[in-house]
Amino acid sequence: MSADGARKTAVVTGAAGGIGRMLVLAALDAGYRVALLDRDREGLDRVCAEVVEPNRRNCVLAYPTDVAREEDCVEAVKHAAEEFGEISALVNAAGIGMVVIRDSHMVEPVRFDEVSAEHWDHFFAINTKAPFLMAKAVLPHLIGSGWGRIINVTTSMDTMHKAGFCPYGPSKAALEAATAIWAQELNGTGVTVNVLTPGGPTDTSMLGQKLPFPRSTMIKPAVMKAPLEWLLSRHSDGVNGRRFIGRYWDPKLPADLAADAAGGPAAWPGAGQAGVWPTTDE
């Protein structure tokens, strides 16, 4: 809760998914009211029933939303603000994976020329454009209060360029780059922008049912909970333009030490030689 005892409000997209469910729970445990956004109305109702204890039923709002549509994003934020008050945090977890193209993609990889133009557009609409639209919609609330959080769920760096993961990897790489840009542009406003990712194949429906490894060996969505709670707190004030990997977050450590061990810069600073920009000096 905030210093005056009032609950802040967080918006979580992709809230009906396996990772989304865990992020909703983390936001609730961090003292937030939570607006849950997803296209899956039944999934939203199920998550609300699973994660909400009787004493905080008034802390959740399920709002079916197509986050790839700007008007839907604006309306969802408006509705959440009317119900709960000013928005303090956005967690962009909505996303689609290669299973959309082929359920067996983990054992029969999709080559880029098998991807239709419609699939390409769909991946970028959900994985890249939607977080941009949501960030634009919530930003006036965050800037207005002088404090806020935007947290984008991208993917492991190697997945961004892994064979068989086009267009998923490129769409998440674009969101990673956008995170670094937004963090720079919002520096000094009290609003921070960071990345949170599990750190490898995660036990959700994202990868499909046909896998080359036992599902029991996959990362569990629960690794996202502790780092998100910290990112949503004032203990992470000033932490900006960073990426945090859930599987490397040790909840037994003090949060600042866990963050140091699990964190690094967002995007790819220092990778390769920097471009030479003209100077403005006369």
Image (cartoon, grey):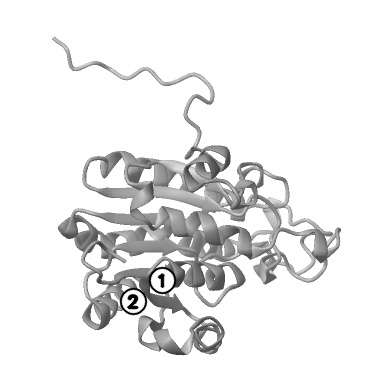
Give the image location of residue 96, x and y in percent: 58, 66
Tag 2: amino acid: Asp
Which residue is at 53% across, 22% downward?
Answer: 272
Give the image location of residue 114, x and y in percent: 70, 58
The N terminus lies in which quarter of the figure? bottom left
88 or 276: nearer the viewer: 88
Give the image location of residue 157, x and y in percent: 61, 42
Against 63, residue 27 (above or below) is: above
Q: How many marks?
A: 2
Specify whether 251 is left or right of 126.
Answer: right
Against 251, residue 257 (above or below) is: above
159 or 34: nearer the viewer: 34
Against 47, residue 135 (above or below) is: above
The C terminus lies in which quarter of the figure? top left
**Location of mark 1 (residue):** 67
Give residue 110's mark: none
Q: Quadrant of residue 129?
A: bottom left
The answer to whether residue 99 is seen in the rendering is yes
> Could you classify mark 1 by the number of other residues whose Cα lies within 10 Å: few (under 14), some (14-19), or many (20 or more)?
many
183 or 21: nearer the viewer: 21
Give residue 72's mark: 2
Which residue is at 41% across, 21% downward?
Answer: 275
Question: Pointer 2 and pointer 1: residues touching (CB < 8 Å)?
Answer: yes
Tag 1: amino acid: Val
> Could you classify mark 2 by the number of other residues whose Cα lies within 10 Å: few (under 14), some (14-19), or many (20 or more)?
some
Which residue is at 47% across, 42% downward?
Answer: 256
Give the image location of residue 136, x and y in percent: 28, 60
Specify whether 158 is left or right of 230.
Answer: right
Specify whether 120 is left or right of 219.
Answer: left
